Amino acid sequence: MFGAHLFIDDQLQNKARATKGFVLLSNGDRVEVLQNLGDRLQIRVISNQLDPDDPQVLGAIGYVPAWIVTDRNVPPIPTATPRPTREPPRLRVRKLNEDDDARCFTMQIGGIDTAGWFMQVDGIGLRGVFDGSGNAQICGLNPRQEATYTVYDRSGRAVAGGRGIPVRGGDIMIGEWR
């Protein structure tokens, strides 16, 4: 029951004031029940461990949910709503257009330093290395050939979101790291 507020109205809307903040009831506090209103009680504070000498707390009359005093029909503890977890950064790829040479495809990545990164056509081994501006090109496909490719970081690991990207000869691809 630690931290239960005392309310000045029987609708439990307005908290009773203490000298510093509000009247709080905790385990071990003593109260006198003045009136039973079913699901709530009117009480008088006899002793208070948090504010044992506050004249605004001792003798204060107010209302509390009945379960705080009776320890019966205690509502379940609310389940905490999980905070949305921030999605880890990854490569997000889209096709810009089909204006490249029909036997090549090009990619530009923004939002991260791609120094040492490379891309490779899956199953064929054609490879392109990213320059200092995040651009790479692979040529050697048959005209308008469809394939998939993977983007690798400087350690040779496929980057998140960069595995098995569909492409066709002539495509210009844009990637953003976010």
Image: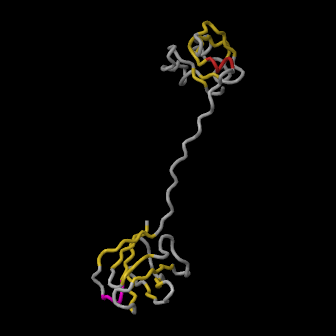
Residue drawn at x 46%, y 83% as measured from the top left: 119
Region rendered in magenta: 101-105
Picture quarter with the N terminus: top right
Assess whether residue 106 is covered by the magenta stretch. no
The percent position of residue 43, horizontal first and vertical second, equals: 61, 11
The percent position of residue 118, horizontal first and vertical second, equals: 47, 83
Q: Is residue 52 above or below residue 37?
A: below
Look at the image and name its color scheme: secondary structure
Would you say the magenta stretch is mainly helix, strand or loop? loop
Q: Is residue 138 above or below residue 9?
A: below
Residue drawn at x 58%, y 10% as measured from the top left: 37
Please count the marks in the image. 0
Q: Nearer the viewer, residue 45 or 72?
A: 72
Left or right of residue 81, residue 106 in this image: left
Residue drawn at x 31%, y 74% as measured from the top left: 96
Q: Nearer the viewer, residue 93 or 68?
A: 93
Residue drawn at x 33%, y 81% as measured from the top left: 171
* Image quarter of residue 174: bottom left
The percent position of residue 132, horizontal first and vertical second, equals: 40, 82
Q: Nearer the viewer, residue 105 or 51?
A: 105
Left or right of residue 40, residue 101 in this image: left
Q: Residue furthest right?
A: 28
Q: Nearer the viewer, residue 177 or 25?
A: 177
Picture quarter with the C terminus: bottom left
